Image (cartoon, rainbow, N blue to C red):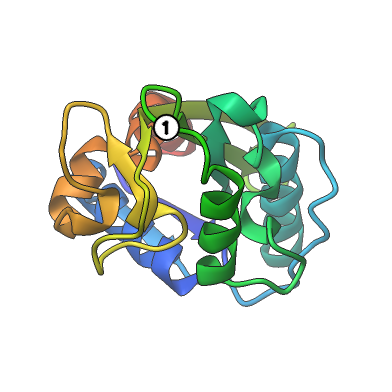
Amino acid sequence: MSLEFVLASHNAKKVREFQRIIGERMPQAVVLPYDGPEPVENGVSFAENAFIKARTAAEHTGRIALADDSGIIVDVLGAAPGIFSARWAGQAAGDEANVRLLLDQLSDIRRPHRGAEFHCTIALVVPDSVMAGGHEFTAEGSWRGNLAYEPRGSHGFGYDPIFEPEGLEVTAAELAPVEKDARSHRARAFASLLPELERVAARLG
């Protein structure tokens, strides 16, 4: 059964990744672009920030909305950068600056103490205009690994060039997109979300 929803993100690379993941696992879904306002992510958890984005998109469009909040959790940094991953080197910092700062902070840390994981929380918001009473749900996914000493690879985005997934000798940025989509934290979170999306689709008929 088909389901139409807005993917609440202005990050083109993240949108493309989600479109591949959703297309593979829920080919009947219609993923609509989002060009509405970008809210202030002032939550103190991945779930809070995901809901902030999804609720904003649902209110703006009147449609079902999905939004994710994701980041990298580094063991020796007490789970930082965490929710601050996208702006670790400053509010306007880009991926390269964030990666370089994190590597500098870990410059004296050797293996096996460079453990980390990618985390993703996806929020689903169904507005009352679509389903009486509305509906909200979250799903989570994590991807364990270690941090490399220098960036490697040209695929992906964010911290992918320095994240070596557990059991592999390459970084996430060295994986082909289809390989990353089969393993990543977003893929795992969406797999947990899929049954709920199918229940929503069935209720809407």
| Residue 7 visible in the picture | no
Q: Is residue 1 above or below residue 198?
A: below
Q: Is residue 133 left or right of residue 6?
A: right
Instruction: Please tell me which residue is depicted at 42% across the width and 64% down the height of the picture.
Output: 15
Query: Residue 37's x, y, as percent?
Result: 75, 72
Q: In which quadrant of the rendered image does the C terminus lie?
A: top left
Query: Residue 34's x, y, as percent?
Result: 57, 70
- Residue placed most toward the observer, 196 or 179: 179
Query: Residue 113's x, y, as percent?
Result: 45, 24
Query: Residue 112's x, y, as percent?
Result: 37, 22
| Residue 42 visible in the picture | yes
Amino acid carrying mark 1 in the image? Arg
- Residue placed most toward the observer, 42 or 116: 116
Q: Residues within 10 Å of mark 1 (few under 14, many from 20)?
A: few
Quarter of the image holding residue 194?
A: top left
**Residue holding disc 1:** 110
Quarter of the image holding residue 56?
A: bottom right
